[in-house]
Image (cartoon, grey):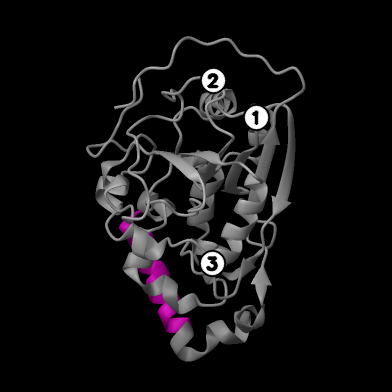
Amino acid sequence: MTNRHSDGSAGDADYSRIGKGYALIRRPDPRIAAHILDALGDARTVLNVGAGAGSYEPVDRTVTAVEPSASMRAQRPPQLSSAIDAMSDHLPFDDDSFDASMASVTVHQWPDLAAGLAEMRRVTTGPVVILTFDPVPPVHWWLIDYVPELFEVESRRMPSIATIVRALGGSSEVRTIMIPRDCVDGFGQAFFARPERLLEPEVRRAMSAWSFLPPEVAARFVFELRSDLASGEWDSLYGEFRNLPEFDGGLRLVVGRRAAGYRQAVGPAEPAR
């Protein structure tokens, strides 16, 4: 049985502890959102699994959100529908209930990735759209030099793109999503040109990987980065990042579709909590 945290969080990160202020930092970037909308196509009904505070949910469709963490559900803005307290690996919906489904930077949190993706496929007639990060950074960049421990954590947590594609079955397209220099969404790679932002505790708290590092590692990172920014050492070594208009930080969009003749027999859906 999955061990859930005090607020219902079902993954490895405890959002009852790190979730405060999450929605203020992890806001949807409109350029990334445009890629997701394009992948959803003309779907009118959309399921969002691991919906969190609602980032990237389209507002021009009928969206059903699933989120086990009460901390995250409480941060959903009023214009979005309330999220259902349910788990990715046991979705309380009948087969073929939705035109499309989506999951935004969440699959690394799921207790059973294969079961969760199979459930999304079961309840979705059209595209299953997964926004995630490649666990192997495609470009060596400055944050790796300051805190390699962070990337070691993420390499263990983030499923490979090949694993996601294999679990979805059918046919899948993998799209590279370039990260703009002024990205609104506050994930770690978004600050490739703005290192000063990663000195802010609330920014780091909105990235679950930091919660798995010892406090002394974070303290070392802050001290070294602050010192190098003040002395000009950071700009001497890495200043070219400030001028990049966009960056490949490993953000990927996997768009999966059913194979011809797809069939899956399941029992009746359980009522949502």
State which quadrant residue 100 falls in.
Answer: top right
Does residue 47 sit above or below 214 in this rendering? above
Residue type at mark 2: give it: Asp
The N terminus lies in quadrant = top left
Residue 225 inside the magenta-drawn segment: yes
Which mark is nearer the camera, 1 or 2?
2
Describe the element under mark 3 as helix, strand or loop: helix
Does 15 sit left or right of 244 as displayed? left
The image's mark for residue 168 is 1
Q: Which residue is mark 2?
A: 95
Q: CA distance from mark 1 to mark 3?
A: 27 Å
Does residue 108 sit above or below 134 in this rendering? above
Residue type at mark 1: give it: Leu
Q: Residue at x 68, y 41 (%)?
A: 255
Q: Earlier in the sequence, mark 1 or mark 2?
A: 2
The image's mark for residue 209 is none
Residue 130: tell me if it is visible: yes
Q: Could you say where residue 200 lies in the image, as x and y percent from the top left?
A: 35, 72
Which mark is nearer the camera, 3 or 2?
2
Q: Could you say where residue 271 lies in the image, as x and y percent from the top left?
A: 34, 20
Q: Which residue is mark 3?
A: 190
Stretch of the chain drawn in magenta: 214-228
Residue type at mark 3: give it: Ala
Q: Could you say where residue 115 lies in the image, as x and y percent from the top left?
A: 52, 23
Describe the element under mark 1 as helix, strand or loop: helix
Residue 29 inside the magenta-drawn segment: no
Q: Earlier in the sequence, mark 1 or mark 3?
A: 1
Q: Could you say where residue 152 lies in the image, as x and y percent from the top left?
A: 53, 49
